Image (spheres, rainbow, N blue to C red):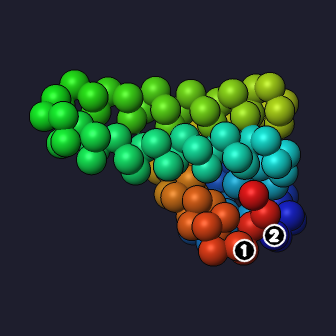
Amino acid sequence: MNRSAPASPSHFASFADFYPFYLSEHRHPVSRRLHFFGTAIVLTVPFIAFAVGNPWVLFAIPVAGYGFAWIGHFFFEGNRPATFAHPFYSLAADFVLFRDILVGRIRF
């Protein structure tokens, strides 16, 4: 895992510049696990909604995605979620982190 963060987290020229900062904000293993589980739920909910025929189930997506992640940040990382300043990069990074954990690039 690349733990070097850019000097200025307020502006990123690209996602490639943002992701090392994102990883530096997710060093605690419990936080990474919470992000992983939240993203897994986010990816599963649309199938559940379709299976039960209830589109209201889709409202669980932001609750699971943000809920698990924010618990990780506020209680384990002690930092502010990147979602507040960089919502699109942060969302993309959640899925990249999920993949990186699945393939073993980043420790679970």
The furthest residue to the left: 53
At a point 27% along the width and 47% down the height, the residue shown is 47
Residue 105, disc: 1
Marks 1/2: CA distance? 7 Å
Q: Is residue 103 above or below residue 72?
A: below
Q: Quadrant of residue 82?
A: top right
- 55 sits left or right of 98 in the view: left
Query: In terms of sequence position, does the residue under pointer 1 or pointer 2 come before the other?
Result: 2
Residue at figure coordinates x 82%, y 70% from the top left? 2
Q: Which SS class for mark 1?
A: loop
Mark 2 surroundings: few (<14), some (14-19) or many (≥20) residues within 10 A:
few
Question: x%, y% of residue 16?
Answer: 62, 72
Q: Secondary structure at mark 2?
A: loop
Nearer the observer, 97 or 17: 97
Q: Dot 2 corresponds to which residue? A: 1
Residue 80 location in percent, x, y?
A: 73, 32
The amino acid pointed to by label 1 is Arg
Q: Indicate whether 23 appears above or below 65.
A: below
Residue 104 x %, y %: 71, 73
Camera-nearest residue between 55 and 62? 55
Where on the picture, by quarter, is residue 17?
bottom right
Find out whether the residues at labels 1 and 2 contact each other: C-beta distance under 8 Å.
yes
Q: Is residue 106 visible?
A: yes
Image x and y of residue 107, in percent: 79, 63
Judge by depth and name the residue closer to the eye, 11 or 48. 48
Between disc 1 and disc 2, the foreground one is 1
| 44 relative to 100 in the view: left or right | left
Q: What amino acid is at disc 2?
A: Met
